[in-house]
Amino acid sequence: MQRGLGLRQRAAGWLDLPPEALMNVPRVEVVGQLQVRITNHRGVARFGRRLVVVRLPAAGATVSVEGTDLVIGWISRDELLVTGQIRHLRFDDGERC
């Protein structure tokens, strides 16, 4: 599996594409404490004013956005924007010990 990942990374470089375009990984952009944009998501698992949990491409993986007054500013098939007072981001790879 690691070999395929390396090939995709090299192909992205050769084609001058961002890695997430070929590797099926999310891109998370944070703008200060005001907004988080997640590209290549798989939907919202949980939503509230203090917590937004977003599903990621890997089985069971999520990213949690914690803060206050959180709002989903917009959402599309593969991109979403969370705004508010962002306090924490937490990634969970879905693996359990």
Image (cartoon, helix red, strand yellow):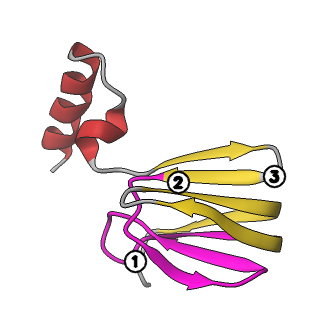
Image location (x, y in percent) of residue 56: 41, 65
* Chain-order first, disc 3 or disc 1: 3
Image location (x, y in percent) of residue 89: 68, 62
Report the amino acid beneath label 3: Leu
Q: Quadrant of residue 14?
A: top left
Q: In which quarter of the image is residue 64?
A: bottom right
The Cα atoms of the two marked residues, 3 and 2, are separated by 14 Å
Residue 63 forms part of the magenta stretch:
yes
Label disc, if present, on residue 38 of the rendered structure: 2
Label 3 sits on a secondary structure element that is loop
Q: Would residue 7 be found to the left or right of residue 63 on screen?
A: left
Q: Residue at x 66, y 53 (%)?
A: 36
Q: In this view, does 5 lie above or below 79?
A: above
Depth order, front residue of 40/8 = 40
Q: Would you say the residues marked 1 and 2 are in contact, meaning their CB atoms lie under 8 Å apart?
A: no
Q: Which residue is drawn at 35% across and 40% down?
A: 20
Report the residue marked by disc 3.
Answer: 34
Residue 32 forms part of the magenta stretch:
no
Question: Residue 63: in sight, yes or no?
Answer: yes
Q: Is residue 69 above or below residue 26?
A: below
Q: Would residue 31 be found to the left or right of residue 39 on screen?
A: right
Label 2 sits on a secondary structure element that is strand
